[in-house]
Each structure stands twice: as C-alpha cells, then as structure tokens.
Amino acid sequence: MAGLFTWKFIQYRNRYAFHVMGYCLTTAKGAAETLKLNMALILLPVCRNTITWLRSTRLARALPFDDNINFHKTIAAAIVVGVILHAGNHITCDFPRLISSSDEKYQGLQRYFGDTKPTYLDLMRGVEGITGIIMVVCMVVAFVLATHWFRRSLVKFPKPFDRLTGFNAFWYSHHLFVIVYILLIVHGEFLYLIHKWYNKTTWMYLAVPVLLYVGERSLRALRSGHYSVRLLKVAIYPGNVLTLQMSKPAAFRHKSGQYMFVQCPAVSPFEWHPFSITSAPGDDYLSVHIRQLGDWTRELKRVFAAACEPSVAGKSGLLRADDATKKSLPKLLIDGPYGAPAQDYKKYDVLLLVGLGIGATPFISILKDLLNNIVKMEEENDTLSELCPPTVPQNGERVDLATLMKASRRVKWTLKTTNAYFYWVTREQGSFDWFKGVMNEVAESDQRGIIEMHNYLTSVYEEGDARSALITMIQALNHAKNGVDIVSGTRVRTHFARPNWKKVFTKISSKHPCAKIGVFYCGAPVLGQEVGKLCHDFNQRGSTKFEFHKEHF
Ligand SMILES: Cc1cc2nc3c(=O)[nH]c(=O)nc-3n(C[C@H](O)[C@H](O)[C@H](O)COP(=O)(O)OP(=O)(O)OC[C@H]3O[C@@H](n4cnc5c(N)ncnc54)[C@H](O)[C@@H]3O)c2cc1C
Ligand code: HEM
C-alpha cells in the first residue's frame, strides 16, 4: 500500500495538474491506487472454498488462514482510510482549487476538462462523481451494519425491516458490495486527468479476485442443489440443543474440525447457517449439534420438534425422530465442508482440546476420529499378532515370506496422536446428554488411555466453595474405587467449578517434556485470551511447546 501510494503521489507531483491542485491531488490519487489494491485483496480471505483447499497445501505453513476474517476487516479499515483521503481530498480540496484557478493556469488542463472551466456541480454530476457518491453511500451503510456491534446485536429495525436481526441486516447489506464493484469498474473508466487506456488499471486489479469470488458463489449455488440430504435421526436435548444426523452425499469429504452450512427451506429459503460437523470422516453419516440462539435456530427447533416424538425409555434426548417413527421430516440442504482451525489437530502428537458449551462441537468430531482410529489400530494389531506369532522362529523353523511382507506393511500403521486431553466446560449437568454417546464410546473403547476427558460444571457452586471441593473429593474417591464418575456414569471425570488452567498446563507440560502440543480452543474470547496467554507463558518457561489455535462462534 505504501509503495503504491508513494508511486502515484510522485507521479502526480511531477505533472502539470499539481501546480493547479497541489498536494490534494497527489494524495487523492495515491489513495485511489491503494483502494484498487485493497478492493481486490478484500475478496481473497472470503473465498472459503479456495482457503479450505489452501489450508491443505504448504502455503498453510506460511500464511495464517485462521485469521482470514481479521485480515478481511483490516483491509476494510484500510479501505475506509483510502475512501476518506480520496473522496475527501477531491470534494473539499482539489475540485475547489480547480474551479477557482486562474484562466492562465487552467489552460494547461483544457484537454482534460474542455475549453470552459467546469463548475463544482459539473464535476459532481459527471460519471465519476455520481458513481463515486453512490459507492460511498453503499459503503457507509454496509460498513456500519458490518461492525461487530450490529452483527452481534439484537437491534430492532423499523417496519418494513422489523423481521431483520442484526446478523441478517449485516448479511443482506453486505451484498451492496456487488453494486460497489460494478460502479468501481465504471468509475475507473472515467477518471479525470487520465486518457490512455493502459493507465486505467482498476479492472486489472479486480479481474482475478472478482472472478475467483464469482466462481466461489457459483460453486456454492451449484453444490447446494446437489447436497439435499436425507435426515436419519433428530434428537432434542436439554439445554436447547438439536442434533441432526443425515445421510452423507457421496462426494462429501470432510476433516474433523471443519464446518458446513445448513439451510432449511421450511425455516427460510435464503439463510445458510454454519455448524461444525460432529461426525467423524470415517462415519457413514453427517451430524451437527445446534444450540438455539436466535430466530433461525429457534424456528428450526420448532419445525423439527413438530415432527418428533417423545424419546423412548433408555434413549437419550427429550424428543426423537428416526426411521422407527416414520414421520416425514423437513427438507435440509447443506454446503461445505469448510476449513476451520481445529482441522490441524493431525499435526500434533499431543492435543489439548478446550470447548466451552456448544463450542465442544469441533472436538467431538476429533474425538470420534481418534476413537475410530484407535478401534482400527486395535483390530490391525490383533490381525498382526495372528499373522506374526510372538515366539521367535526356532532353529530350522521357517516363516512364510508372504506372511512377513504382509505383516511388515501393517506394522507401519500407527496412530500419530499419543495423547488427547479434552476439557469441556458447561453450565449445567443436562448438557452432558448432548455428547454422552460419543463420550461413553470413547471411555469404553480407549483401553490404552489415549484420550482423557474432563467435564467441568460451572453453575453448581462458585469456585472455591467448600461444597464444590467436597463433591470433587467424593468424585475422586469413587473414580479411584470404581473407575466410574457418579455424575456422568462413565469414565469421564466431572468436576464442579471452573478449571484451574494453570494446573492443567503444569500437569500436561510435566507429562510431556519437549513435546509440541496443539492447543485448540472454541468458546468465548475471554477464556480464549487466558488459555492463549498460558500457552505463551509456558512456552517461555519449559521445554514443552504449546501452539494455540482458537475459534469463536
Ligand atoms: C464456523 C462456525 C461454526 C459454528 N458451529 C456451531 C455449532 O456447531 N453449533 C452451534 O450451535 N452453533 C454453531 N455456530 C453458531 C451458529 O452458526 C449460530 O448460532 C447461528 O447461525 C445463529 O443463528 P440465529 O439466526 O438463530 O441467531 P441470530 O440471533 O440471528 O444470531 C446470533 C449470532 O449468530 C451469528 N450468526 C447468525 N447467523 C449467522 C450466519 N448465517 N452465519 C454466521 N454466523 C451467524 C451471529 O454472530 C449472530 O450475532 C457456528 C458458527 C460458525 C461461524
Ligand atoms: C469494501 C469493503 C468490503 C467488501 C468488498 C466486503 C466483501 C465481503 C464479501 C464478498 C464477503 C463474503 C460473503 C460470503 O461469500 O459469504 C464478506 C464477508 C464478511 N465481511 Fe466483508 N466486505 C467489506 C467490508 C467489511 C467490513 C467493514 C467488515 C466488518 C468490520 C466486514 C466483515 C465481514 C464478515 C464478518 C464477513 C463474514 C465472513 C464469513 O464468516 O464468511 N466486511 N465481505
């Protein structure tokens, strides 16, 4: 940006027009050059399919793809500065200087503006003026509605927009950028003080990113038509969580930690909402866990609750629908999968997964994937010990070469993850039902103790409360005696009050000296900062290195 600004600034500093309009002109033109670059750059971090693909390439080592939206916002901020400098200088400084210039000075600019000096109105109502004004208006609306405050707020809009929520207002207004891009290309063709076609470079900056983004949107539209899924199971849990289990389209390949968009025409034919995929890549179905938050998720629950029946004794969930109930369920469309920070878990031997409430969803898929691999590994090992008898062949005894070859191929098959620690912090005990099935399975199948699971219930007693300490002690005794937790009824350890993160980090770092540990966090930013800071602090102290990845939804 600095380079482009300086280049244009110097170019116009050396032109005749500088003697008429001065530094207002050089600044306006310098800013315009950065705007062209930034309007191109801003589209790249929101090309989700491209980024998902790039995450799996070597580029992921150099570029922080997890920060794509922050990059998008930073470029947006640079655009705000660019627009202020560009439009501000034209409107308040160089236009007035041009129209008030002496006839003698104006003569040198006649070939650009005509024989008679233009008025202020002439300049404003030219193509560049009109397109510029409309772009600024569209941008102001879209920028204001895109601010964090609006996106996250529950502002009530006046009629006829009263059904819009903050996020939807942001989403729809963001599409004003389609108009902005069309106008920007037109604006770039009618620039004053530029006649030669090769100096009109706006379209050159924009061509590739705009085409890439148009391709992305077309792909999404095409794919969503193909990805109409059949619902296999629906369950509604305490804590207002809805689980949807659906058939997996043949071409759908995801990694644990990734997310997908879901659309339900019975709720809204326009809205697509993102949800982490909770099933593992090896499962033959897809599943999502959806917590009710606003209008769309609430309506989704209502629509599905109408098609559900009370749960059969022994099955978890308050209401259920599956093949047995034979009720017709609303149609569902999906789009994805898309990349997310947690998908990098395979890079590490030791994992620390921290989920807050519904933020556990990306990690459930990881746990399931680990579990599937553990089961597969156990099976492989059983086959291996059958193929390769533990006793060393005695003198004269022969081992079939084919058997040995087969066995050696199998020996290579190992599980990269040696340890995974899952910390799930929830408000109430009922939340445990959301993922009870998976946790039970993990606890039962993971005989080697690769996965350690902790559930923290924070709404029972305050931290430091004597009752909390007492229950924790009873829990620990029971766990030691029976290996079973009294709250969860499984090997998952339930704790009362908030986790002591420092202790958790101390324990893990002393257990894994010199290891590189992948710390994945999904939840409210406040705790994310704390966990991130602990990673940084522990990295300064010992040989264990913690690499922090966070996500927030
Ligand atoms: C990558 C990702 C993964 C997610 N995974 C899960 C999950 O596994 N389980 C779960 O319960 N929730 C998940 N969410 C959050 C979920 O998408 C929102 O809770 C849901 O879209 C809320 O919609 P609403 O209309 O009911 O609520 P609203 O009141 O309209 O919105 C509440 C908040 O949700 C966000 N939001 C709303 N609509 C969208 C949208 N279309 N796209 C992105 N964000 C939106 C906004 O920040 C908004 O402030 C995830 C979000 C993201 C970005
Ligand atoms: C010139 C300015 C901008 C342009 C051209 C632009 C363009 C876009 C585009 C094309 C998308 C992708 C939508 C999609 O395909 O899903 C997007 C998403 C988004 N933009 Fe912008 N934007 C601009 C400014 C801003 C600003 C000022 C903010 C906030 C401060 C912002 C925040 C976001 C967010 C949060 C998303 C959602 C990304 C996601 O989760 O997929 N944008 N923007």
Image: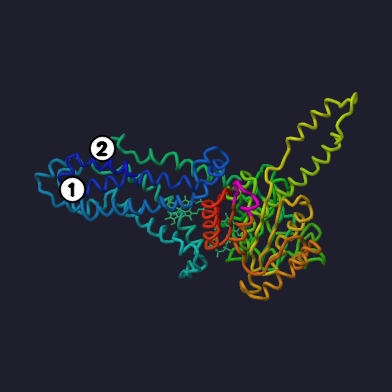
Q: Residue 366's x, y, as percent?
A: 67, 51
151 to the left or right of 414:
left
- Rendered residue at 76%/61% (across/down): 321
Which comes before the other along the chain, label 2 or label 1? 1
Q: How crowded is mark 2: few (under 14 residues within 10 Å), some or many (20 or more)?
A: few
Q: Quadrant of the N terminus?
A: top left
Q: Name the residue under label 2.
A: 195
Queried on whether the Cβ of the residue with tag 2 lies below 8 angstroms from ligand 2, the answer reads no
303 to the left or right of 22:
right
Q: Is mark 2 on a helix, strand or loop?
A: loop
Q: Give the total of numbered labels.
A: 2
Q: In this view, does 74 lie above or below 458?
A: above
Whether residue 9 is in magenta: the answer is no
Q: Residue 270's x, y, as percent?
A: 56, 56
Whether residue 515 is in magenta: the answer is yes
200 to the left or right of 280:
left
Ligand 1 lies in which image quarter?
bottom right
Which label belongs to residue 543? Answer: none
Between residues 75 and 96, which one lies in front from this camera angle? 75
Q: How crowded is mark 1: few (under 14 residues within 10 Å), some or many (20 or more)?
A: some
Q: Which residue lies furthest to the top in this view?
A: 396
Q: What stretch is highlighted in magenta?
A: 508-518
Between residues 283 and 110, which one lies in front from this camera angle? 283
Q: Residue 106's x, y, as percent?
A: 13, 45
Q: Is residue 159 above or below residue 331?
A: below
The disc labelled 2 sits on which kind of residue?
Answer: His
- Rendered residue at 77%/31% (across/down): 408
Q: Looking at the image, can residue 14 be seen?
A: yes
Between residues 82 and 420, which one lies in front from this camera angle? 420
Q: Mark 1 points at which residue?
A: 21
Q: Is residue 82 above or below residue 300?
A: above
Q: In which quarter of the image is residue 391?
A: top right
